[in-house]
Amino acid sequence: MRIGIPKGLLYCRYHTFFETFFSKLGSEIIVSEQTNKDIMDMGVEFCVDEACLPVKVFHGHAASIKDRCDYLIIPRIMSICKKEYICPKFCGLPEMIIHSIPHVPKVSMEPIYMQNEKEFFKWCFSAGSAVTKNSAKIKKAFISAKKAQKKSRTGIIEPGQKLTVMLAGHPYVIFDEYLNMGIVNKLRAKGIGIITEEFVSDSETCEEVKKLVKKPFWTFQRRIFGAACVLLRHKRIDGIIYLSSFACGIDSVIIDLIRYCIGHFPMLVIKLDEHTGEAGMDTRVEAFIDMLERRVLNENYNPSPWECVFSGQNPV
């Protein structure tokens, strides 16, 4: 059986698991190409206008391989951590694909709960049963995929020579070079260090969110907000660049929380959609870096009271 896996959304984080799992079942893995203009154009054509850019691009990835596979994996990921959820668009992703793209093959429909092994295996058993009825083989493939996923690691940690920024946002934006217009390579070319939220532990982010009035409902809200606060408190970054998808409701909450807590600490928010121009983004990034250089390297900077609180200093 040919298994189609679109290279969009959380593929960047869990591709090792899915590809290993179906390979161990003896399937041929069909993966879409890296995001490009043709895939984006297909996604915009098939997806509803109200969706965010990553969801539109996922439609393009699915459409690009639908005729080359027998079973299309559409990850209806509901939860990664206990009592937390991720983007609501994932909840209806299979239905969006089926009703938006004509002539799709069989699609995985079961929800995925990753907060514990037992719940996660339910999805693997359901999806694996489409390939083989051998339950022992499915269990063995699940164990192998789990081990492979544990060894894989996403994220960027590259301290800069003079400046380091936190590159914040959903992973499927940060690690898609076409969507973010190569911002990672642009920062590297300028000698700017990069760190992403993957290199802040869950325990540290949980300590930071305890300071909020209400516990975050979304996993990425907790992770990104908590990581930004931890990195600032430990003085590991000189600024934050947040890549946000236009029409993303979760991003709007995270950005406001971070701004509220960091005070005057430098933060650049770049909104991305299918109409975003690379030249405009380059100008904004260069201006932000120039500002950081003047602020950190040339000026006698005095932190705001908020920054003093998060860095443990006495603001008086």
Image (cartoon, grey):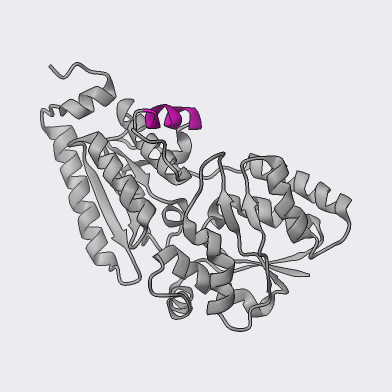
57 relative position to 122: left or right:
left
Q: From this viewpoint, which residue is outermost toward the front? A: 214
Relative to 121, say whether 56 is above or below: below
Tell me the quarter of the picture where residue 10 sits. Answer: bottom right
Tell me the quarter of the picture where residue 244 sits. Answer: bottom left
User: Where residue 205 appears, x then y in whole percent?
Assistant: 43, 32
**In this view of the protein, can residue 183 be seen by the observer?**
no
Residue 204 lies within the magenta run: yes
At x 45%, y 45%, the residue is: 218
Relative to 239, say whether 139 is above or below: below
At x 41%, y 68%, the residue is: 51
User: Where residue 162 appears, x then y in whole percent?
Assistant: 27, 35
Residue 29 lies within the magenta run: no
Quarter that holds the N terminus: bottom right
Relative to 305, say whether 124 is above or below: below
User: Where residue 143 appears, x then y in whole percent?
Assistant: 77, 44
Tell me the quarter of the picture where residue 238 sits. Answer: top left
Depth check: give the residue in front, 53 or 97.
97
Depth check: give the residue in front, 42 or 110.
110
296 relative position to 258: left or right:
left
Quarter that holds the C terminus: top left
| Total numbered badges shown on the rendered structure | 0
255 relative position to 59: left or right:
left
Q: State whether the magenta stretch is mostly helix, strand or loop.
A: helix
User: Where residue 150 appears, x then y in whole percent?
Assistant: 65, 40
**In this view of the protein, can residue 293 be seen by the observer?**
yes
- What residue range appears in magenta? 202-210
At x 56%, y 42%, the residue is: 153
Q: From this viewpoint, which residue is outermost toward the bottom? A: 102
